Image (cartoon, rainbow, N blue to C red):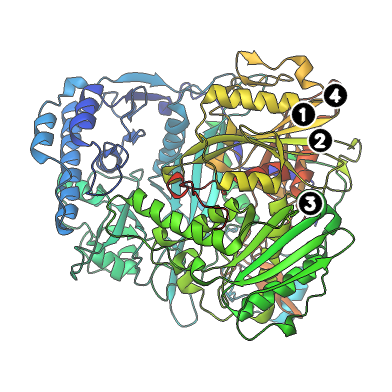
Amino acid sequence: MRYDFLQPLSFRLKSFAGHALAQYWTCEFPAAWARPLREQIFKPTTAEGEAEEEVRAIPLWAVNSAIAALMPQVLTHDARARRGEMWLAWSAAAGGKTPDRTQLVEFVKGGLMAAAMHRNQLAERRSRRQVIDITALARILDDFRGEDLHFTRKTLSLGLGDEPESSDYTLVPHALAAHLCTSGWKVIHGKAGAPDAGMDVDEAGGDLQAAEQENEEAEAGAVAEAVYTSSWRRTAARDGAELVSWPPHVYESSNGVRYPWSYTLRLSVQTRGLETAAQPRLHVRVGMRRWARYNVFDPKRNIGVHLLSPSPWSDASSPFGLASMAWHPGPAGKKQGFMGWADDLVPTLSRLGSFPFLPDPAEVARDPLAFLEPGPDRQRPPVAGVPYRPGLGKNTGHAVGDGISAKDKWRIFSQLVPALADFAEVDAPCERVPIPSRTRPAAADLLRIDRSALAGAAGSRIEIVLWCDTTTMRDEALNAVAFALDLPVDVADQPEQVQAWRQRFTTAELEVLLRVEPVGEIADDLELDADIKRRNDRLKAAGVSRQQQVSRGLGHPEAGTTARFVLVEMRGADGFASVDHDPKMVVRAGAALCEAVTQNLLPPSASEETEDGPDYAEQQEKESASGRRERTRRAVSDLLIRQTGLVRPPTRQGTKAHELTDVACLGLWVVRRTGDFKAVMPLAVATVPDRPHALVRLPYSGWLPYHRAAIQLAGWHRPRTFDKPEVQEFFADCVAESCDGGDLALFTLAQNIRSLCPALTNPHLAADRLAFHPDRPLAADDCKGLRHIRLRTNVRDETAQHFAFGKGGPDVQAGVGAGLWASKDNDRLFFATADKPSTAGPGSPSGSRLEPHWGKVSKDKEGWKRDTLKDVWNPQLLELLVAVKQSDDSPAAWAALAHQRRFAAAHFADPLMLPIELHLAHKLGSVLLPSHQLEPIQQSESS
């Protein structure tokens, strides 16, 4: 079905003036309390031989959550005790008085003491020294006084033209979430009294009605309806405010197994750029939360728990607290492991409220369903839910699918509109922009590499090394390379064991040296010297040793070789003893010393790594030969296409009314890495019409081929942290170098670049002016032919969810529409949605977890079905803001160009999240390795 309109799940906020919800008391966490806590108590601690940790934050998250549970009128925000940040907000409608200062002081003192004692107990159980000086903490807490708390009366005013204050971004969503709960807002799924209400529908997709009756109803346009009700509770959230449907809905399988799940609703305040008057918006994100029902266990990661304290003062607006539990192994060599709380919320609640019913973590882990659906024999039981995730314990699969359909989004959002009518009005739908259609490339076209394009990107003499451990993957890799480059490789001639082998192939475009080598110890766990006490020194020693092995195995490139590529058969991350034993990074660094780029290939029976990371223990299921062949081909494509920056631009760019030709594209990016990888490094990726590959500009370099830039980054020994002026100057230079008078499209991602380039933030962004520093715009001569398209993704909910509909309206059919959409409020603002990828879930966008819809129930049969068990694809909404254009430009054409560049990957049929230039820049960031694994290696010419 064609959809002509796109509805963002967003509201334009109105003035709260005159409403009781507009009045609040707010206060900061007193600096007189925070200073001694940071300086004397929650300070850095180091274990013997370990690197210094970051400064401990004051554990206010647990204190805040406990206060919210015990005092429902309080909304909490800042859990870091930062100066100038709102810590507490108290509804002035609650009697018109400020909060009880004495009570708040006691909550803070008791909560901090409970957190400190909890941490000391954990250290004691592990036979470590105490981490908190309880006596010193008690002395500091004794000086806390109620008069240290200073409350300010605040009136919320977020109508048209009102720029939100920093506290508004959190206060308003929480205030509205509390209002929805206390007003008893509910969502009705279906229409009460409909003829088919309560019909019996098979959850697995079948139907239990007569086929003749179903066909008659379908032909008559009848819609099957079933009535369900979702009530809602607040739950603690790190960002924005969140509601969860409570009690949970339950799917019961044919054998009586119950699978609980809930809808979630996240609210956040957002703004947009280049608006004539500030218009704060409320974004709504509808989601799913499946609850674990079996024994849960994870020895490596914390397990989240949503906990509703049994406070006698709680009401409908009291939020769930977010606690976490973890397996504590105890002292080395002793079987004293236990399941315990991993944070301070439960100990804090226990101390402040003295509640006897708070759950034991071992019991919650053993039987989470007993706390989610407590039996009648429990007296005032706590409510605790463990969010389900794959791999959480054994046999913990969840029957209910993941994701949320367009139908469910429309159903919930349409009933939220009247509930928030006093505070906001719904955003107008966006209209489709006609753009040229795209022919999806065939799979064979993606796997076969254009040799002339590869020669243009990597040079005419390349070397491909296949480091293999098994003959299975050796043969697959040889076949994949032969297929990709159309080389006459005879795999049947290979020996029964992986042995060194090489052959040279000469074509009209390329000379290819193809080598096979046993990977041997190169892919084994890093050998860590336990006698070296400091972790970084241990890793550096192990890394240098392995890099030397890699260098000896690869050797120097032959004279005249223009590029080297190495495919390494290696286990997934969970296949090694620990993160520190994983050699992937140092193998890459060692290969870079030999002027080669690498790509990893999992051994047989191991499936591809997912976005959530590899799980080697779960990858032992036998895979099919075709599946193994396809993933090997994809690995070879990634090595020879993506890592050389090959691109395949769309045939037609721009809109149907204004097509664009001969446009150069430039993407600016900041690589951000933390911890061992710490880096803040700018780079730029450019494509030009006459080159089939991308070029990269790094600090301290000119423009480089993509694979050469990857090699430089893999062995980067220069400074990797750049301050704001350095980043801004680098970006200005890149733009000036790229503006030669021709058409240039500049792409930036707001969430990536704006903290270092504040001129690109909404308050400072100016139409048709490019600046990275608010007071220093680029000169007009440096911007000839420039167009700047600023993008935003749904990170931190900065773009709204959405659904699409046709001219009949969403109540006829709501779905997911792909294309470019124009905002009715701003002629420079557009939104882009992508086609459904081949890997998306089978659930229909017009389906529902609760309401039946008409569709295929088997290969040759249609009927009523409910998509309770199917995964549903949730597409992102990409915002495209044409911030700089030329006088006679069509903004829609340049927004369309940015959208169409998402389809320019030469090895990937589905759309990328970002234009290819920003995608390749993001991928380069993963090449930058930890500095402690990059000790320079001095070696002789003969090594």
Q: Position of residue 69 (x, y in %)?
A: 28, 43
Q: Which residue is the site of mark 2? A: 664
Classify residue 96 by image quadrant. top left
Between marks 3 and 2 in the image, the one whose residue lies nearer the viewer = 3
Q: Which residue is mark 4?
A: 741
First reached walking from the N terminus: tag 2 or tag 1 = 2
Question: On the image, numbered disc 1 is attached to which residue?
Answer: 738
Q: Nearer the viewer, mark 3 or mark 1?
A: 3
Observer-nearest of 123 and 802: 123
Q: Quadrant of residue 137?
A: top left
Mark 4 crowd level (few <14, some 14–19, many ≥20, 10 Å Cα): few
- The answer to whether residue 839 is above or below residue 725 is below
**913 left or right of 328 in image:** right
Q: What's the residue type where badge 4 is placed?
A: Gly
* Spot occupied by residue 266 in the image (x, y as percentages of width and height): 49, 45
Are the residues at dot 3 and dot 1 in contact (C-beta closer than 8 Å)? no
